[in-house]
Structures are given as C-alpha cells and as structure tokens.
Amino acid sequence: MKASVISTAILATAASAAPALVKRQSSDIDGTILNYALTLEHLEATFYREALAKFSAQDFAAAGFNESNFYENLKTIARDEQTHVDFLTTALKGAGVTPVAACTYDFGNLTPSTFLATASIIEGVGVSAYLGAAALITNKAYLTAAGSILTVEARHDAFIRQNINETPFAQPFDVPLDFDQVYSLAAPFIKSCPASNPMLPVKAFPTLSVAKNVTMPVMQGEFITFDVAADMKVPAGPLFVAWPLATGTMFSAAIVSDCTITARVPVSVYGPAGESFAILTTNATAVTDDNTVAGPAVVEIMPLAA
Ligand SMILES: *[C@@H]1O[C@H](CO)[C@@H](O)[C@H](O)[C@H]1NC(C)=O
Ligand SMILES: *[C@@H]1O[C@H](CO)[C@@H](O)[C@H](O)[C@H]1NC(C)=O
Ligand SMILES: *[C@@H]1O[C@H](CO)[C@@H](O)[C@H](O)[C@H]1NC(C)=O
C-alpha cells in the first residue's frame, strides 16, 4: 500500500479505530513523537476552550477585535485543536501506544488581548514543533498526517498574527525546533500531568526571557536584553545567543552581566523575522541540547520590508 493511501486511511478513520497497517508499521520513535505532538495539542485545545468559555464575541469586540467572523474563526481554531487531540489519541491507541492525557495548565489571568498574544506564540511554537519533529518520523503515513496538521497550525498562526497587527507570514522559512526547545517553551504553562501519562524524553532548559524594558517587535541589528533567573549559575567563558533558522542558525556574541544577557539581532534577509527564538549557548557554530545554557526565548522581530 502506498504511503498516500495509508495516510488517507488514517485521516479518514480519525474518529474510529486506526487501521491495522499503522500498528505494524509504527515504531517506538513514532509513538513518542505522536505523544509529544499530543502533549502540545492538549495544551492548545485547553487554552482555546478556556478562553472561549471566558470571553464572548462582545468581549473581543470591546477589546478591538470586532471583525466580522472573528469569533467564529476562534471557535473553528478551538474545534481544530480538539480534533487534533482526538485524532492523535485514536492513532496512538490504534498503534498500541498509550496516549498522554491532558495536564492541568496555568495560562495566567488573560484578557482578550493577552490571550491573542499568547495564542500567536503558542501557534508559532506548534508550527516549529511539527517542523522540527518531521525529520525524525519514520512512518511516511504519520509524516503526511503531521504535515497536514502543521499547515493548519500555520494558518491559525497567520490569522491571529494578522489580527494583532503582526505580519502574518514574516519570513520565507519557518523555524524547526527540537523536543527540548519546544518543551522549554511549553513547560511554563504546564502545572502537573497525570501520573499515568507515559514519560516523554523531554526536559526544559533554564528560562531565558526578554527583559521587561524591551519593546517588541525589535529590529534586526538592535541590541536586546534578556534575563535569566537570579539564582542561575551562568557558565564563565564566551557565550553566544543562537538564532535557530531553517536556513542555518545565526549567532551573536552574548554580553553577560549578572543575570542579564545582551546580544545583537543578526542582520540578514535570511535572518530572524516575525516570531523568532533566541537560545543562550556556549558554542558559536552549532546549538545543541548539550551546549544550551538557557532558552529559547520568544522574540518578535520586525520583518525587513519587501
Ligand atoms: C469595529 O470597530 C471600529 C472602531 O470602533 C468601527 O469603526 C467598525 O465599524 C467596527 N467594525 C465592525 C465590523 O463592527
Ligand atoms: C534594559 O535594561 C538593561 C539593564 O537591565 C539595559 O542594559 C538596557 O540598555 C535596557 N534596554 C532598553 C531598550 O532600555
Ligand atoms: C561547537 O560545535 C562544533 C560542532 O558540533 C564542534 O565541532 C566544536 O568543537 C564546538 N565548539 C566548542 C567550543 O565547544
């Protein structure tokens, strides 16, 4: 059976049992990746469900989000995220892997505006998560299924960015992130998970946050300040801020002073633009989990004019 046929079969059976063929072809790594994706989809689905329960169309309109269909579109996003949860849960069960259940989350005390700002970050991280995982998926049918979710997350992201006056597609390439990088961005929202959830091989790095006095978006070429936790032991020796990019990670020298780190945003048409990620590392040529000191931080960067 051709991969395209299998993936159609998987998609068609989202709500029922996944086909036996999936079970035979699945491998441990694919089950782990699907559970990692499901971890993020649970977070997204809960995030939208809670916000839509809290805020009405009138609440958004009063906050300036009054375009016709705005609220309907948010409801569609919420439905998509729940459908992704149901789909991945069914696919994992069909492959004989225990799916992770939802955790409890803390998204802070959101307003319509801060909800949308957080939504844009979460959608962007979701895109980077699927993109980073794609190369590791061994089953082509899963790859097609994951790709079909990725493109929809990218459209959610574009819709939300447009509505908060950020460029909907700020760069010609989206940024792939690895498991630990993504988990580091998701972890602050996750309070606790059911003990029965399968353990995933992910860990969160120490937090790197854009300093409170920085106004985003920042420009390429601008120096920007980050904070690390006051009790964090920052290694001595040269440190760098890595800007992961699909076309090749860029690096800036990091100027460290106590728990503040300052670095210049790289200047290039291929450089970071839109929702971008900054990672504090000890290596100036390759950022890996082993040489990551803190981060990623999410940095919104003004795209260069076309
Ligand atoms: C949205 O609000 C603006 C400013 O209050 C107003 O000019 C516009 O007509 C409103 N649009 C809709 C679709 O209600
Ligand atoms: C923000 O504060 C840091 C000191 O914590 C300072 O070095 C930096 O210049 C400030 N940045 C802006 C944009 O004011
Ligand atoms: C940086 O990473 C590269 C590629 O992995 C490696 O060859 C090099 O030794 C590393 N440099 C340092 C200072 O760790």
Image: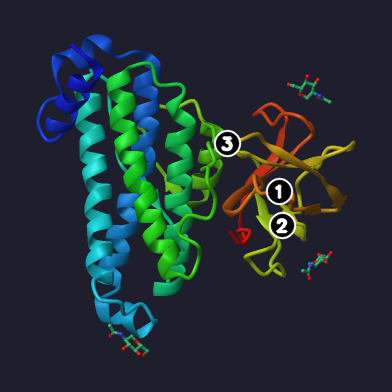
Q: Earlier in the sequence, mark 3 or mark 2?
A: 2
In the displayed structure, would residue 35 be above or below residue 127? above
Amino acid type, mark 3: Ala
Q: What residue sits right under mark 3 in the picture? A: 246
Looking at the rendered image, the quarter that the C terminus falls into is bottom right
Ligand 3 is in which quadrant of the figure? top right
Q: Secondary structure at mark 1?
A: loop
The answer to which of 193 and 50 lies nearer the viewer is: 50
Q: Crowdedness of circle 2 by 10 Å Cα count: few (<14), some, many (20+)?
A: many
Query: What residue is drawn where x is 61% and y is 39%?
Result: 245
The residue that appears at 23% across and 71% down in the rendered structure is: 69
Question: Is the residue under label 2 in contact with that under label 1 (CB below 8 Å)?
Answer: yes
Name the residue at the left extreme. Answer: 16
The label on residue 120 is none
| Residue behind mark 1 | 268
Q: Is residue 180 left or right of residue 113?
A: right
**Above or below: residue 36 compared with residue 241:** above
Badge 1 residue CB within 8 Å of ligand 3: no
Q: Quadrant of residue 282?
A: top right
Q: Quadrant of residue 22?
A: top left
- Residue 220 - label: 2
Task: For marks 1 and 2, give the one nearer the viewer.
Answer: 1
**Label 3 packing within 10 angstroms: few (<14), some (14-19), many (20+):** some
Task: Out of 103 and 36, give the one closest to the viewer.
Answer: 36
Q: Position of residue 59 (x, y in %)?
A: 31, 80
Task: Say which residue appears at 61% left-offset and 62% top-offset.
Answer: 305
